[in-house]
Amino acid sequence: MRQFIVPSMPDSRGILTLTGKDFRYLHHVLRLQPGDAIHVRLPSGALQTMAVASISGHSINLSACQEGETQETGVTAAELEAAEPSNRIPLWLFQFMPKAQKMDLIIRQATELGVAHIVPILGATCQKGAACQREERWERIIREARQQSGSPVETKISSPCNLTEALNLWKASCEESPCGVILYEKNQHTKSFHQALNGPVPCVAGLVVGCEGGITANEVQLLVDAGFIPVHLDTNILRAETSALYGLAVMQNLLTERQLWQSSVSNF
């Protein structure tokens, strides 16, 4: 676990008291003892190294401490945060809802990649029952994925909505120069990722991925009218969950490299 995400801030004494599931996880799963330290992600977004001050009954008290040995191996959450670009472009995922287990996997992988906002879409080809209430489970998946990956990005997920509502959310949240891409199975009238991103560095980037039944021509047209660019990946036929991971990774990498290149040019 790279970081532990907590629901509240420390009290006036600098003490953070955890009970319930958080207590059981820290005490019975991680088996933390007084003096052990972990990286804690506070609701403010700050990363704080905290040590176990005391354990009593069904609660555990944490207090701030100096950076030191923590209960994690490999790259620490603090090191990940130090390497995080301060101006990273927020990435949105518009996912036409596949089967429940696939959606869970997509949410976990998107969170690990540092996606800022996930918007589940109920499209024309989505299976019946895709709109079942799973928001509580999704929030738990996001929290666990952030804890394991150390992601400093507070990934948000919307309630399932139709495409029009999703586009309204996108328009209301975007500033100038957004960039939207649709992963499209057909290759007519499409562009490559490089062509789609060949413009000013966007303030926010969005990726649209279909479900098992794909995206209908009418839905694609609605997206195009909203400024999204159809992109065809010259690969094998990919499952919905593979397409989401592949597309997000490619888009994130290209945007990051563009930022690094522009930064290096501006330094000359």
Image (cartoon, helix red, strand yellow):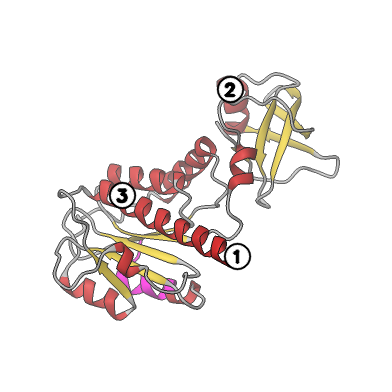
How far apart marks 1 and 3 lie (CA) works out to 34 Å
Can residue 196 be seen at all in this image of the molecule?
A: yes
Choose the circle earlier in sequence order: 1 or 3: 3
Q: Earlier in the sequence, mark 2 or mark 3?
A: 2
Residue 246 — which label?
A: 3
Residue 249, given in percent of the width and then of the height, sits at 37, 50
Residue 250 against residue 171 in the figure, above or below: above
User: Is 143 situated left or right of 169 in this image?
Assistant: right
**Residue indicated by mark 2:** 30
Q: Amino acid at mark 2?
A: Leu
Q: Nearer the viewer, mark 2 or mark 1?
A: 1
Find residue 41 and report its image quarter.
top right
The residue at 70%/18% (across/down) is 33
Question: Residue shown at 25%/51% (left/top)?
Answer: 98
Could you tell me which quadrant the C terminus lies in?
bottom right
Residue type at numbered disc 3: Tyr
Q: Which residue is mark 1?
A: 268
Magenta region's main secondary structure?
Answer: helix
Chain part drawn in magenta:
160-170
